[in-house]
Amino acid sequence: MINRIVVAGRLTSEPTLRQTESGTNVGNFSIAVERRFRKKDGEKEVDFFSVVVWGKLAEIVNDFGYKGMMVAVDGHLQNRKYEKDGQQRQITEIVAEDIQFMSKKAREEDPLDDVPW
């Protein structure tokens, strides 16, 4: 069986970082991915995906990622259920296994300028 997804788009907000009770880093962000084709009126269609990232990669995304940055996310899809306010909810999200910072969007001070690639 294959469960693989690769998307490229822009971060829609600043990434978040937290730790599980066991001390493992986990980060979250969402990504806006433009569809390949436009609507009949010429308007772009965009899909929004929730992304979860674990461990050292979560730290890197938190330290260097920012709203508007173009990234490529390689990972797999996951469905999970949780309870909020007594209601059962379900979410489908991308679990990132690799993230590539693809380009920079104009920003006064860009943390990637100091990264020795």
Image (tube, rainbow, N blue to C red):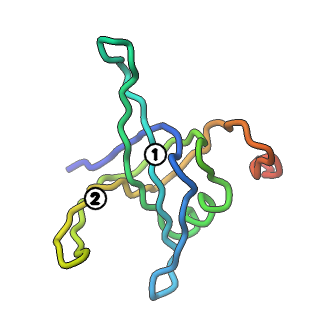
Residue 90's quadrant in the figure? bottom left
Q: Residue 78 carries which label?
A: 2
On the image, the x and y values in percent for residue 45 come to 36, 27
Name the residue beneath numbered marker 1: 31
- Residue type, mark 2 in image: Gln
- Give x and y (percent) for residue 59: 61, 66
Residue 111: which numbered mark, if any?
Answer: none
Q: Is residue 80 left or right of residue 115?
A: left
Q: In which quarter of the image is residue 89?
A: bottom left
* Placement of 42 over or under 3, stated as above or below: above
Residue drawn at point x = 33 percent, y = 55 percent: 93
- What percent of the width, then of the height, locates residue 64? 67, 55
Question: Closer to the observer: label 1 or label 2?
Answer: 1
* Image side of residue 77 versus residue 22, left or right: left
**Which residue ends up furthest to the bottom in the rendered image?**
22
Q: Could you tell me which residue is drawn at 61 percent across and 42 percent down? A: 69
Q: Nearer the viewer, residue 37 or 94?
A: 37
Residue appearing at x 24%, y 66% in the figure: 80
SS category of the residue bearing label 2: strand
- Helix, strand or loop at label 1? It is strand
Depicted 69 relative to depicted 42: above or below: below
Q: Earlier in the sequence, mark 1 or mark 2?
A: 1
Please name whichever residue, 23 or 47, is drawn nearer the observer in this view of the structure: 47
Q: How crowded is mark 2: few (under 14 residues within 10 Å), some or many (20 or more)?
A: few
Q: Which of the two residues, 6 or 18, is positioned nearer the viewer here?
A: 18
Kind of residue at disc 1: Ile
Give the spatial CA distance, label 1 vs label 2. Answer: 16 Å
Q: In this view, does 80 lie to the left or right of 14?
A: left
Query: For this view, does 5 lie left or right of residue 103?
Result: left
- Residue 83 place in picture, x, y as percent: 22, 75
Q: How crowded is mark 1: few (under 14 residues within 10 Å), some or many (20 or more)?
A: many
